[in-house]
Image: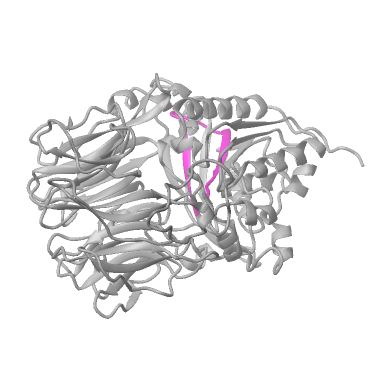
Amino acid sequence: MSGAPWTPEDTLRHQTIAELQGSPAEELLVCTVQSHNAAADRMDSALWCVPLDGSGPPWPLTSGTTHDNGPRWSPDGTRIAFVSSRAGRSQAFVIPRHGGEARQVGVLDGTVLSAQWSPDGTRLAVLCTVAVDPDLRGRRPPADAPPPRTGGPRVVWRLPYKADGLGYVLAQETHLFVLQVDGGRCLRLTDGAFNVRAAAWSPDGTQLAFVRTRDSDTDGHRTDLWTLPATGGHARQLTHDLAQVLSPVWSPDGRTLVFSGSSRDGDAQVRLWQCDAETARAEPLGDDTIEVGAETASVRFAEGDPGRVLAVIQRRGAHAVVSIALPGGEVRTLAQGDRQMKALAHTRERLAFLAFTPVEPMEIHACTHEGQGEQKVTAFNAAWWEPHARATLERRRFMVPDGEGGTHGIDGWLLRPPGARGATPLLVDLHGGPAAHALFDYPATAYWSVLWSRGWSVLALNPSGSSGYGHAFAERLAGHWGERDLPEVLAAVEALRGEGLADERMAVCGKSYGGFLSAWALGHTDRFRTAVVMAPVADARSHYGLSDSGYYADPFDFGGTPWSAPQAYLRASTLPGAARSRTPTLILQGENDQRCPVGQSEALFCALKRGANPPCELVIYPGEGHTFTVSGAPSVRRDAVQRIVEWVERWVDEPLAPPQED
């Protein structure tokens, strides 16, 4: 095998690029680059400038010894606003485009989350946390009230009351402020028992569009689009009937707002919407094939063109950069391929975006506004990536049972080790969601490369329920978790065996919903000799009340609540099957996970141990949440990769123990 083998230590070398912003004055990007601080066992981030015209290499704008993020160009392109923790708590800063000393803008009592320039370059719209007293249960305190208490009992009076990555959230709110860039004078614009999630200036600078949660004790997860004068005053609600509104952007003429969102509680299929700023009429933009997924912040209007929206959309397991016409929704593809993309930005002459595959590292690419002349313009990960062995990546199509007596096709990605001939051991990797798709991000899949450099193949499928294939395909799984997608997975595996590409040495692995499906497989097939289950939904009934999103997401998938549709939840429990399992199983879990709480993994482990008791281990990472494999401490991510590789290699060569006699 040519090339150096991949190791778990490689997880500490990867640099993640994010938050691309194009200069309004020149062919220059600013972006955030995250890298590992091994001594402190954390991720730090710096701002980098990236020329798009070939005038020179990228250069760091900040030192990268703290958390610098959220860069935004001033309207004249001479300064960059950003958020930094260099002063202790995150605050707003401004730095000259050519570098130099960053200057803090104002002082806010809470944690600044984002800062956006006004069109005239004199103000910043800032989202900042505000401490509140949970004992007041959303009421406003009197003017002479003492500061909110810290610590003590955590009063829970509304939903949601917790969030993954944040924990208990009722002791603070997020509100909208305006800061004067010169002088730092602060004006608070919003107040109430809700949270502001996003804000955007109107082109003339007189209004701000913002997204806020509802001040409801049962529907506080739902969000609506509002506007209000930038100098303060009465706020106007534009949307009322949507379940989720995200990331609004104004058209250059100020007549239209485009945003991402969904119409039904729990629906993870995020599409684009357009709203008339005057009449407040909101309607879908285009059809349901325009799925933006997690790339809601990559939607923007083309330079000076109110009739053209640019976006990164999901498309059959990959991504595409597209131009979407307003009002008709016609889509024109500008960049695509068997790769995934993120973080769209533009300058006057070019579009820029992140592109990556499992065998090509994340870098910034640029092309013209018409999609021509694409080039890779950075090499943040090239030096450490290039010497490694490289697998082959192939998109595959499998005909599988459709769960209704017929067959249909599903897509998957097959990674084969360099120079592979014939059958190899196979890792079947199952994605989360379920309304998501197989991810290419290296931090999430670092164990793939370690395994393929040791002779493994990897199959990452997009079975029923996956996004990027339209609503009908995603909704095929509603009420049928495990029942429809596991047979599809097994059929794809058998197809590879029939081609002589895989043998009996098979492992299954998955996280979140993929953790559910890999746990479901334990009790419904003997095909896999070993399994790795990460942060699963192990028992749907308890997940409904324990998860930060279960109370509104699970009814979408199961057609009701645990008391209105009890059989649907009962069928989706992995515990009865796990009690029968003979498959050696490793369970990995973040202790502070609020999306799929630690009790889910504990229940699965207990079912395995008190059932047939195959070899099994539960590893709990203190202080880590649901995203521990992607954004956890570097030592945690390295440890997880090491444990996954060691576990599957330890057990994949051993056939399952025979069933126990009753």
Which residue is situated farthest in the right direction here? 662
Q: Tell me if 571 is positioned left or right of 89 in this view.
A: right
Q: Residue visible at 57% across and 30% down?
A: 644
Name the side, left or right, on which 493 lies relative to 169. right
Please tell me whether residue 417 belongs to the stretch shown in magenta: yes
> Which sits in the foreground, 278 or 491?
278
In the rendered image, which quarter contains the C terminus? top right
Horizontal arrangement in the rendering, residue 108 relative to residue 23 (left or right) = right
Image check: 271 left or right of 603?
A: left
Q: Position of residue 142 (x, y in %)?
A: 41, 58
The count of marks equals 0
Q: Position of residue 337 (x, y in %)?
A: 32, 50
Q: Which residues are magenta?
A: 411-432
In the displayed structure, 558 sits above or below 168; it is below
- Asked whether the viewer can see residue 374, the reply is no
Is residue 548 one of those drawn in magenta?
Answer: no
Judging depth in this view, the residue of 229 and 339 nearest the camera is 229
